[in-house]
Image (cartoon, rainbow, N blue to C red):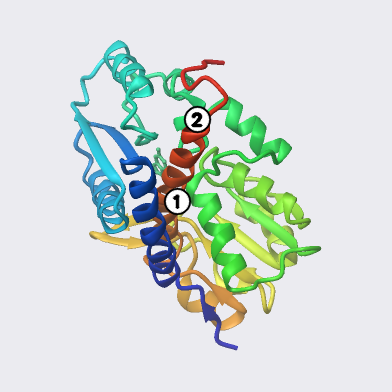
Amino acid sequence: MSAVILDGKAVAQAILQELQPEVALLRQEFGMAPGLAMISLGDDPSTHLYLRNKKRACKQVGVECFHHRLTAETTQEQLLALIAHLNKDPSVHGILVQLPLPPHIQQEEVVRNIAPAKDVDGFHPLNIGRLVTNTAPPLSCSPAGILELLLRYRIPLEGKRAVILGRTELVGKPVAMLLLHQNATITFCPDDLSMARPEIQQGDLLIVDIHKPRAITGDMIREGAVVVDAGSNYIDGQVVGDVDFVSVQEKAAAITPVPGGVGPMTVAMLVKNTVIAFKRQQTATEPLSHRY
Ligand code: GUN
């Protein structure tokens, strides 16, 4: 068997093209475009590559993008002051603080200070609560992108055994919640892959985000599994996933490539979340600057 390639790049382009006329209409109706503020600290090259892709996608759709490029020495107080300013800025409808942050910054406090209505990453505790209760949260971009990709390829999820490798706040935990709401059976695995082997072998759907290049190989998976690789590791200047694409595609029914799978979907969902946040703020009933 040779797997169907789940082409995140093509699906992301389709989503951006769907958003473009919607943004044009919103601009006409409300006299302004949705605005996204992105904050980065320091000069990590991979961070700046991600942010360039995000800016390009915003531009394509007509979303205003404001990049606040701060130095790695920025203090917690300075960062919180900028967030407080953006929370009140009526031209900003979404705020993204690019992670990871330098070690002297307390990430949890930063996330808690973003107005929940402008939290286009879905990281605020209030929005995580909404994710758990399935009450229209802004969905974290990579998990939302993974779900959207699976749905657009009509991959059946109900009753399927979804095995999740990696328990991060960015991917593993929120994607589990999204798949739970699709009525899948969810299994989390221990970090030690040798202990996880029996579970991996049972998976109809594998979601992999373990920061270990090409660690999941064809011999580990079930024939006909659907494999989503959310990993991105840099080796000799090249990005490679957590899944060994060559051996896994021989056995899988479908697989996401790296690059060109989850990455572009994450970017498209960020733009979509900004448009959703804009629309909600035009009819807002809750205070934007609420802190919890
Ligand atoms: N760093 C890597 N992925 C993400 C993401 O989805 N959001 C933010 N804010 N930072 C990231």
Q: Residue at x 76, y 64 (%)?
A: 160
Residue 97 placed where, x, y %?
Answer: 36, 32
As rendered, which of 170 and 246 lies closer to the eye? 170
Residue under label 1: 272
Residue 257 placed where, x, y %?
Answer: 44, 70
165 to 228, vertically: above or below: above
Q: Quadrant of ligand 1?
A: top left
Q: What is the quadrant of the N terminus in the image?
A: bottom right
Please tell me whether mark 1 sits on a helix, a strand or a loop.
Answer: helix
Residue 180 visible in the picture: yes
Q: Residue at x 21, y 46 (%)?
A: 45
Residue type for callout 2: Ala
Residue 209 visible in the picture: no
Q: Residue at x 54, y 40 (%)?
A: 138
Residue under label 2: 117
Report the Cα–Cα distance between label 1 and label 2.
14 Å
Quadrant housing residue 154:
bottom right
Q: Residues within 10 Å of mark 1 (few under 14, many from 20)?
A: many
250 to 120, vertically: above or below: below
